[in-house]
Amino acid sequence: MRAINIVTHCATCEDLDERDLKRYNVCESHKEKSNVRSSEEDDLRKFVLNSKFNNYTLYDHYFWNYTIPQISKEFDLLRIGENSVINIELKREANEDKIKKQLKQNNYYLKALNKQVYTFCYITCNNILYEYHSEDDSLQIIKFDDLNINLQNQEMLIDKGIDDMFEPSKFLVSPFNKMNEFLNDEYFLTDQQVNIKKIFYKY
């Protein structure tokens, strides 16, 4: 998968229908397939319009709609540098409990990259940006200027080879030999396990 410039991406995708949108995402990012929806593209467009970063390069080097191989875990935006990784989730609306739960889980996985991890969530309906702090397990409303600083401080950004950085075997936790991680929801499910879970909760 290849990283993209999200300004260029949004300008190109603005008038595409769902079918052409998926095709463009595959070609642009060199993915095998794309599950991105028009509503997600709308959220990304609002993020770009409202962020107003002071440097155009801060819109570059994003992995958009990335899914970890073999694990049903998706990240909206990932920007990975030599010294830090920044994750930005985009939502139309969500309560703080759900935001915190997702960002906490994202932080758990991303810290395995052995870099400083920053996790954010942008709510498009009210233009609010949250940051999750793992040190005290808290959620804070911040300004785009704060995110801007974190982006500027990233060094040696990568733009491809993201799959090589993630090893799913580290996170397929067994409840029998890693009880604490399992009880703390610090695990991910394979696609097959997710389907079984969906079937189970129907009954």
Image (cartoon, helix red, strand yellow):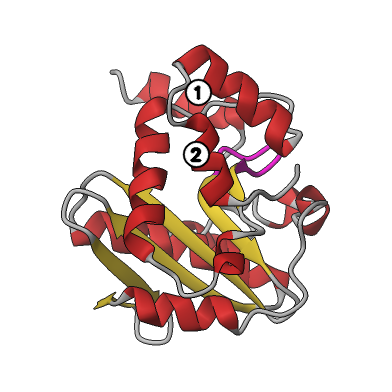
Q: Which label sits on residue 195?
A: 1
**Residue 79 appears in which quarter of the rendering?**
bottom right
Q: Tell me the kind of residue under disc 1.
A: Asn
Residue 22 at what x, y percent from top left?
57, 22
**Residue 111 appears in which quarter of the rendering?**
bottom right
Q: Tell me the kind of residue under disc 2.
A: Ala
Q: Is residue 71 highlighted in magenta? A: yes
Prevailing SS of the magenta stretch: loop
From what the image shows, is residue 21 above or below residue 111?
above
Disc 1/disc 2 C-alpha distance (Å): 35 Å
From what the image shows, is residue 19 above or below residue 107?
above
Judged by depth in the image, the label closer to the viewer, 1 or 2, is 2
Residue 5 at what x, y percent from top left?
62, 51
| Camera-nearest residue between 71 and 146 | 146
Quadrant of the snapshot with the C terminus = top left
Q: Is residue 25 highlighted in magenta? A: no
Q: Name the residue under label 2.
A: 11
From what the image shows, is residue 175 above or below residue 22?
below
| Camera-nearest residue between 101 and 175 | 101
Residue placed at 35% from the left, 54% from the top? 49
Label 2: element kind: helix
Q: Which residue lies furthest to the top in this view?
A: 19
Mark 1 and mark 2 lie on one chain; the one further toward the N terminus is 2
Q: Give the range drawn in magenta.
A: 66-73
